Image (cartoon, grey):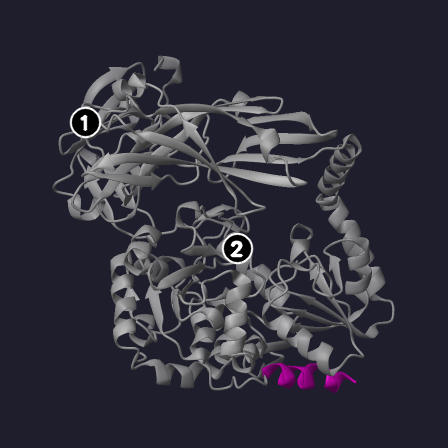
Amino acid sequence: MSESAISNKLIRAITFNQNKLFIEFYFLQDLMEENNVVFSFMQRGTDHTIHFPITPIDEVGDFDVYQAVIDLDTCKQEFEQVGTWDLYITMMTEEEEEKNFRLKSNKEELELLFYLFEEQGRIFFPYTTNKGNASFRTRNAGVVAKIEQVTLDKGQLQVAGYAHYSKWSEMPPSSIKKTLIVRNNVTEDIVRIDLPNVDRPDLTEKYGQGRNNFDLAGFETTLNLKDFAFHSEVFLKLYVELTFPENGEQVTVESGRLKYQTFNNRYSFQKGIFNIKGSSKKVRIKSTKKSKYLSIRIADYSLIREAKGKVRRAIQRIRGSKKIKKVYKLAFKFLGMLPADKKLVVFESFLGKQYSDNPRAIYEYLKENHPEYKLYWSADKKYLRNFKDKDINFVPRFTIQWLFIMARAKFWVSNSRLPLWIPKPNHTVYLQTWHGTPLKRLAADMEEVHMPGTNTVKYKKNFLKEASNWDYLISPNSYSTEIFRRAFQFDRTMIESGYPRNDYLYQANNQETIAALKERFGIPEDKKVILYAPTWRDDQFYGKGKYKFDLELDLYKLREELGDEYVIILRMHYLVAENFDLGPHVGFAYDFSNYEDIRELYLVSDLLITDYSSVFFDYANLRRPMIFFVYDIDNYRDKLRGFYFDFEEQAPGPLTKTTEEVIEHIKQVDSNPVLNPKFDAFVQRFCSWEKGESSKKVVEEVFLKQR
């Protein structure tokens, strides 16, 4: 590396030698004092930190080069467990203050520098985070694969990369067969393309370190994109499959979705146009923003449509400006002075992203029992697909039509906060349904706020200002009533009815409905269903309103132990912005994070795995087993949010921290299907108001009394 390319806190080299890990990094000479600085591995999601001494070994320009030596035998118990470790330099100041400096990656192919824990069948390897930092991760051994080069030439796409099975500690088998797997988002068809083995002695020389051989890891091929242009819009995902002899048998393993993380912006985005059967197709090749997957999009092309799209995007940028918001606010105030339409109701669920939750239950009750009302849904433009083909009236958020309807509506029904800039007309009745019984601290009860784009004081001020507009608030139980009054500083009408969304769990809980749902979801009728529905982490985010989620639950191990009897449904929180690659788990794992309403997922599931999400309060109505996967409970409880009650003591199911413990408890449920002894007391405290008539109670209190 040239001296000009060196920067402070940058990794110079990572080396595994026998059972030791050597990490070299640059640090400015005038910042470092050997006696008060250590190298730190900090486990993500917990407070666990391991410190190691450092030694100066070199000097380059203004930088010293330091080395940390980690004995992997000594740290085996920590590092062989599935998880993520971030790298820091920890410095103690003269004031006895601890300062942590994040180490930056040198952006090489770090994933190839893996260490195999043979007994556990797991690999420990460094990688570059989305922000360019250096971290280590432990996961089950599998295929390490990546696309390195992509070249688009009209309708031909040339790809080249590498694929290696991480359990090969020495020379891989000479008779490896590589196959490129191409999946699409429209059909379940899979295209398989044989890949020639390409010699890659350069990888062995640079990353083998005398332990791993990558000579046969390379591959390259050309895709004829015309073969995949069978729909108006198609997205392609690529995987690599390896087949090789092992112990006298042919073994086949598949990689995760192939990534394309180039550090040269010239090649990070490519596009082109080709013709097929008289029509034009546009191809876009890029690396996805968050996960760095290779994204291939083939869509119908029209010059006119392309021009319209550019104009539309320009208008959206203008609409997002502060000046336009002021104009919207003034228009809203003016329209709000017009007479109210006393039968007009506007519903919104999770910021307009879903047709779901308490607003949906109230909407369905009104539609069936009081057809005299005019019912509209406020819909985020990016999620209009969730409202189409449902025989409901919806209007895109923040459009002129939306302004007119919102300003003249007699009733607003929402389960989350509306934007602060929207002035509530005097004639409007605002029903806030909220969206869960609280375990974690809310609003004014939060000691610290770790969310992006705000701070503790600002968050509380804005929250309570919007809450002051609420005329009615629904409470699911007396426990919540007390918390809502204090945390939201709410002093108006509390409707103690139970949650309307849970009416469905009483009205539709029968085998006929469950069988029909399984068939619609494409879930095998003879398999039991696990629902995994965790919440979000305030301090793990891509940006405002877009949260990260690391899937710590080991799907490979779950399938190995439970796949004969179970399938698993993943349902992330609506704020989580991940797009999980479940290609290797087809037939076992299903991602229903974008499914409109979790209530139907509750019904089809035989068992719930969650963490601190309020879903377990709702699921308890079904009186089915629950397991709590709380691998980061110490950090979540003590740092991020805090709990309102002794969760560890009162949870209606076992608390687990590893996939192995989750599997053990699921097997116990199979052998002894008796509910946790704490279950009855839990249901009595949190679910006793819910009998299937909450929607009716809310409508009678809010709508019929306003006549």
Quadrant of the image occupied by residue 465: bottom right
Nearer to us of marks 1 and 2 is 1
Quadrant of the image occupied by residue 356: bottom right
Quadrant of the image occupied by residue 467: bottom right
Identify the residue under disc 1.
211
Residue nearest the viewer, comparing 261 with 545: 261
Residue 30: say if magenta: no
Question: Regarding mark 1 in the picture, which secondary structure is present there?
Answer: loop
Number of numbered tags placed on the structure image:
2
Q: Could you tell me if the residues under marks 1 and 2 are in contact, i.e. CB atoms within 8 Å? A: no
**Could one spot residue 248 in this view of the protein?**
yes
Residue nearest the viewer, comparing 396 with 326: 396
Q: Quadrant of the N terminus?
A: top left
* Residue 564 percent location from the top left of the image: 33, 61
* Residue 185 percent location from the top left of the image: 56, 45
Left or right of 469 on screen, residue 580: left
Q: Amino acid at mark 2?
A: Leu
* Residue 391 percent location from the top left of the image: 73, 66
Q: Residues within 10 Å of mark 1 (few under 14, many from 20)?
A: some
> How far separated are the C-alphas under marks 1 and 2?
42 Å
Q: Residue furthest right?
A: 338
Q: With respect to residue 390, does 231 lie above or below?
A: above
Q: Which mark is residue 575?
A: 2
Question: Regarding mark 2 in the picture, which secondary structure is present there?
Answer: loop
What residue range appears in magenta?
694-707
Q: Amino acid at mark 1?
A: Arg
